Amino acid sequence: MLNPLRSEQEAFRFLLYVVVVVGVITAIVLVARAIS
Amino acid sequence: MEAAAHAEHHHGPPAPNISSRVEAQFLGMLLFIISEVMLFGAFFTAYFFIRVVGHGGWFPVHGDELPKVIAGFNTAVLVSSSFTMHWALEGARNENRNAMRIGLLTTFLLGLTFLCVQINEYVHLGFAPHDHAQGTIFYGLTGLHGAHVFVGLTLLSFATTRAFRGHFTAKEHRGVEVPGIYWHFVDVMWIVVYSTVYLL
């Protein structure tokens, strides 16, 4: 399991996941807001 | 008999009693990050209260806008600094001292750029923390994060100085690894702050 506190490598991977997930959520919300 | 002889020759304090199976350094980092998440959580609670319960709405407030584009540029700067930090660590792991030094120095400079742009943003915003509740929360959240960037820069300055003095090897580079984990944490928090405060 990914543990961002174990090493810098895992913390970096965690950061990349956060960038992707937050980016997708933000895009969905902005698109939904634009449509409605 | 042997134990008694050993006790006779032993000087100094007794060996520490390790009652947990979790490594002490890992536990320390875990508790630190948990306390940090709670600290940011308190500020985010105020933010969500204003947006969900309060009727004041979010920006623009009284004609005051948030500079999304400049903050977006700053986000790109901070995210790229995490890539250079990772590059520096890879350099340390592969005994490539030049990559480690350049990576650490670049990370420090990118972090400094982020902080300078944020200070410049504060100067030109046109509203103060006491003007309205939204302003208070904006300055509180971004200022709290800025303080963390400052701490990260302090740690990075130590690591960079040590790297240029010839410290750190492929086996022993904890002095780069720990600031690296902290730096990525600061970056993760900014992604959340930027998306909620500026974009959503």
Image (tube, rainbow, N blue to C red):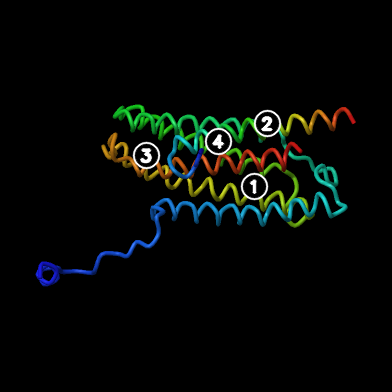
In front: label 2 or label 1: 2
In the image, what residue type sits under mark 2? Gly
For marks 3 and 2, give the CA distance: 32 Å
Q: Is residue B89 left or right of residue B44?
A: left
Say which label, 2 or 4, has the lower sequence index. 4
Please say if the residues under marks 2 and 1 sit with CB atoms less than 8 Å apart.
no
Residue B198: quarter of image: top right
Q: Label 4 belongs to which residue?
A: A15
SS assignment at label 3: helix
Q: Label 2 belongs to which residue?
A: A23
Q: Label 3 belongs to which residue?
A: B160
Which chain hosts label 3?
A: B
SS assignment at label 1: helix
In the image, what residue type sits under mark 4? Leu
For marks 2 and 1, give the CA distance: 19 Å
For marks 3 and 1, give the CA distance: 26 Å
Q: Label 1 belongs to which residue?
A: B142
